[in-house]
Amino acid sequence: MMRIGTGFIAAILVGAFWGAVWMVVIGLIYTLFAGEPSAPQVWVASLAGAIGAAIYILSPVKTRDRPKARGTRLQAVIVIAIFAVLMLVTFGEPFGLSLLYTTLYQLVALVAFIAALTWSIIAVLHDQPAGNIGRYHLEVVFLRFMKGLGLTLFTIVVALPFYVMVMTSFKSQQSLVANPLDLSIDLSQGLSGLFSSYIELFTTYHFGTFLMNSAIVSVATVVITLVFAVPGAYAVARLRFPGQNFLSRSILLIYMVPAIVLVIPLYSAFSQIGLRNSLFGLMIVYPATTIPVALYMLQGYFRGLPSELEEAGLMDGLKRPGVIMKITLPLALPALASVALYVFMIAWNEFLFAFMFLDDINMFTLSRGVVSLNSSEVPRQHLMAGAVIATVPVLFVFLWFERFLVAGLTAGSVKG
């Protein structure tokens, strides 16, 4: 007869917690997609999760003698048990609504809940017994649960605002006023109606100019930063001169001065010399804030490169600039790519200096242009569309170059 101990209790708690978590998450997603306020039955979901976990943990662990234990047949039993508990205890209303309303959305949400709960139970308890278990097994169960919970919450926190932003940008003013919770896509309005907010941004609100200005400033900031940071970082990492250690350790001291403290004197100085309402002024300020962090990142990478390669180049007759151009920089391409990406994102998203220095709408960067939409005269869907336009380009650039960013940040951390 199978013993029931701490393993069984841990399984019950895991199933109950996952039932509550997934019911809240799926209920929230259902509300956003269907536009119907729901009242998810969290305690019933916890009960269903506990029963599903109990069924799973009480079955024997898969061994050579029991090749089908805890297999697909048991998974089907758990799915049926969870479904039965939900439907019987809630009288067919697991989300607090009759199935006659938005039936398709409720069925999809129900399937998603059962699948997510079943998978979570199996992922945490797949090799755990029902009897008494030691501290190690309890820690394994706890860490698996916390890892899954953390990934779930992180995904929701990141994806949910972006989904709300995108869906709101596709809505019309009438639909937003009629039902603010309805964030589903209305395909009946056609492509022109669906993207009307984006079309108006480019035809009425000068967003094409904002995009061009941001691209010019960001690319120029990257180029200027690399031109100054590469030789500076190389000098700190390779050359010997008085004050080298102090300079190496104090590069990031500029970040101890808040940007808001610098804005007022810079505003006054730029106004007097005619740089306040121009992109050239931003091209001066932005590199001043990005060069220190670029120096810090690159010097660590340069120190990690084998100095013997550079010494061999010097012995072959190359001068120091030739060594940098032909040996050091080709080896430092991952670091250069990561620094360029990091600097580009800083310049693309910077708002404070752009807000203070730019008054002419033809000079607005994208972040400054999005803020100009935040008024009672501009529909909310236009503001959301502007936020999407500001977010999507840098998001795609980041995802495309993310491997270079990781390589560049970690390669200089260990000296080779």
Image (spheres, rainbow, N blue to C red):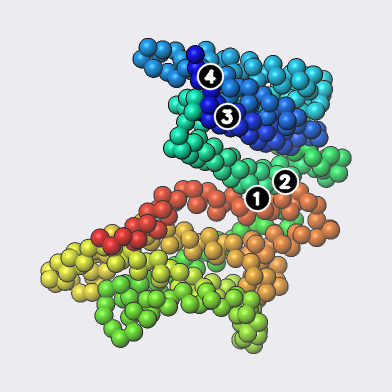
Q: Earlier in the sequence, mark 1 or mark 3?
A: 3
Indicate the amino acid at tag 4: Leu
Q: Which residue is mark 2?
A: 169
Residue at 64% x, 70% y: name it: 352
Note whether 152 is above or below 384 in the view shown. Answer: above
Dot 4 alpha-carbon crowd within 10 angstroms: few under 14, some 14 to 19, many 20 or more:
some
Q: Would residue 309 appear left or right of 339 to someone viewing this image?
A: left
Residue at 40% x, 13% y: name it: 67
- Judged by depth in the image, the label closer to the viewer, 2 or 4, is 4
The span from disc 2 to disc 3 (Cα, nearest Å) is 47 Å
- Judged by depth in the image, the label closer to the viewer, 2 or 3, is 3
Q: Earlier in the sequence, mark 2 or mark 4?
A: 4
The span from disc 2 to disc 1 (Cα, nearest Å) is 8 Å
Place of residue 32 in the rendered image (x, y in percent of width and height, measured from the top left): 74, 37
Note whether 169 is above or below 86 in the view shown. Answer: below
Q: Earlier in the sequence, mark 2 or mark 1?
A: 2
Place of residue 128 in the rendered image (x, y in percent of width and height, measured from the top left): 47, 27
- Judged by depth in the image, the label closer to the viewer, 1 or 4, is 4
Q: Which residue is mark 3?
A: 9
Dot 1 alpha-carbon crowd within 10 angstroms: few under 14, some 14 to 19, many 20 or more:
some
* Residue 80 picture quarter: top right
* Residue 411 picture quarter: bottom left
The span from disc 2 to disc 4 (Cα, nearest Å) is 49 Å
Q: Which residue is mark 1?
A: 388
Q: Secondary structure at mark 1?
A: helix
